[in-house]
Amino acid sequence: MPQRIPYPPCFSGCSKRECCTPRAYKYEWPELKGANGQHAKEVIEKENPYVTVVPGHSQFILADFCCNRVFVFLDENDNVIVGPRIG
């Protein structure tokens, strides 16, 4: 089983989502839009054990690109408002 790369600190081995993770693992989850935030976190961390999910109620994005981070933006009901992806 792969080891999760802790976040922080930011790990960035490239500048594109597609090259951040081995081919066997996902780097985006558009199907989770509208899902419960906790469920989304569980799915993402199961489907890509290299990332850490960072949930939040703001769409503020840091300028740095991190291969080991997935922002999950939530509405007031803790549902995902945009498909999560590595970055």
Image: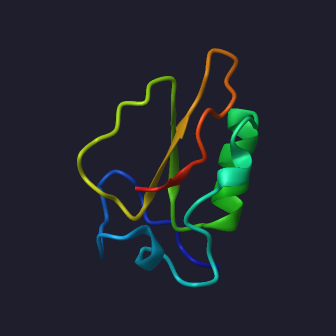
Residue at horizontal 61 percent and vertical 22 percent from the top? 75
Residue at horizontal 73 percent and vertical 52 percent from the top? 31
Q: Would you place residue 14 above or below residue 82 in this image?
A: below
Q: Residue furthest left?
A: 63
Residue at horizontal 36 percent and vertical 70 percent from the top? 16
Q: Residue furthest bottom?
A: 23
Residue at horizontal 66 percent and vertical 52 percent from the top? 30
Q: Position of residue 56 (x, y in %)?
A: 50, 29
Quadrant in the rendering for residue 10:
bottom left
Q: Would you place residue 76 above or below residue 73 in this image?
A: above
Q: How is the image coloured?
A: rainbow
Q: Position of residue 11 (x, y in %)?
A: 31, 65
Return the residue nearer the eye: 67 or 83.
Answer: 83
Return the residue nearer the eye: 39 or 30.
Answer: 30
Q: Position of residue 84 (x, y in %)?
A: 57, 48
Horizontal arrangement in the rendering, residue 49 relative to residue 13 (left or right): right
Q: Quadrant of the C terminus?
A: bottom left
Q: Position of residue 54 (x, y in %)?
A: 49, 41
Quadrant in the rendering for residue 69:
bottom left
Q: Would you place residue 52 above or below residue 46 in this image?
A: above
Q: Residue furthest top?
A: 76
